[in-house]
Amino acid sequence: MSFDISDVIRRAIVPAAVISVFALLRKYMPARTIRAQGDEPVTDDFTRTNRAVYGAMILIGIALAFLTHKALVATNLWLAEADGPATFRLLPSSFIWWFLPGVAALCLSWEITLFFWSKFGDHQTIARFLDWTHKRAGFDSTRALRWMALLIVMPIGIASVLAIPIHSSLRDNEIVVGRYARLARQYLPYSDARRFLLVDGFRDRNGKFTARSEVLVVFQNGVRWSSAANRDFMTRPDSGLVEFLERKTGLAVEHAESETDLR
């Protein structure tokens, strides 16, 4: 049995990172002092309240993730349909729209729960609960989550919004392409197509081959349009799409194992 030090290091990275993060939080965002009433220290036990709050957070997190994902998908489809009638409309994988909902649910459900609680609950009780929670965590968890929202949720939110224009609409005379971070569409007339290929997959930097069906059209200006861009992996090409493009471009279908094999 061989000893792989690199595998040991990889396994240790995540636990080490988690421990380091908690150590930094306890150092730079220490728990606030428990509030007192008169000369008596606060001894409230919020265990039952804590369970109710976590239950509310789970429900709010699920609702937030679902609604955010649905909004991203609907907006992407709306921009694509703005191209007008199309025989085929290729949209990004729904997987890419789950990054923002996921991190938003994790980082914002606590803040949203506290917001609704503050609208109907006693502010002093909420403040005492927060102090109790921070003491148990060993750091100011509310402040930490707010920083996570700023440093994690906001960048992912910006990246997700910039991805909304991505799509391809295959119309009668051209392919209309929406690119990342661009509202202006790119128009690729079928009359400008110079090569039409079916590609089996792609190779990584180490030359390892991964199967992924792809329909590729190369235009005279050098632009390559791919049916696989930003989409889920497919083992077989859409026969209807292949027939449609073959008819529109008037080109014979070529075959390539990967794009790097093209000449």
Image (cartoon, grey):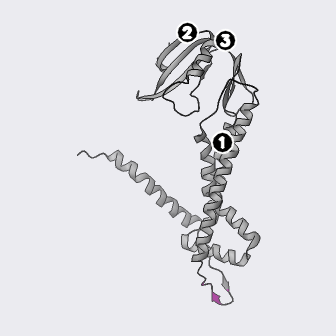
The picture places residue 23, in percent across and down from the top left corner, at 50, 63
Question: Does residue 102 appear in the picture of this structure?
Answer: yes
Seen in the image, is 23 located left or right of residue 36?
left
Mark 3 or mark 2: whose residue is earlier in sequence: 3
Where does residue 90 sit, x and y in percent of width and height?
Answer: 64, 29
Amino acid at circle 3 = Asp
Report the magenta residues as a range: 37-44
Disc 2 crowd, CA 10 A, few/some/many (<14, 14-19, 20+): few
Question: Mark 3 to mark 1: distance in Å?
Answer: 32 Å
Q: From the viewer's perspective, tell me whether residue 184 is left or right of residue 254.
A: right
Disc 2 element: loop
Which residue is more in the foreground, 261 or 70? 70
Vertical arrangement, residue 36 with respect to residue 136, above or below:
below
Residue that numbered label 1 is attached to: 160
Gap in angstroms between the C-alphas marked 2 and 1: 38 Å
Q: Is residue 42 magenta?
A: yes
Q: Residues within 10 Å of mark 3 (few under 14, many from 20)?
A: some
Which residue is identified by label 2? 252
Please say if 79 is above or below 9: above
Q: Which residue lies at the image location 76% right of the left edge and 31% below the top edge?
A: 82
Disc 3 target residue? 192
- Where does the image place residue 157, in percent across and percent down from the top left? 67, 46
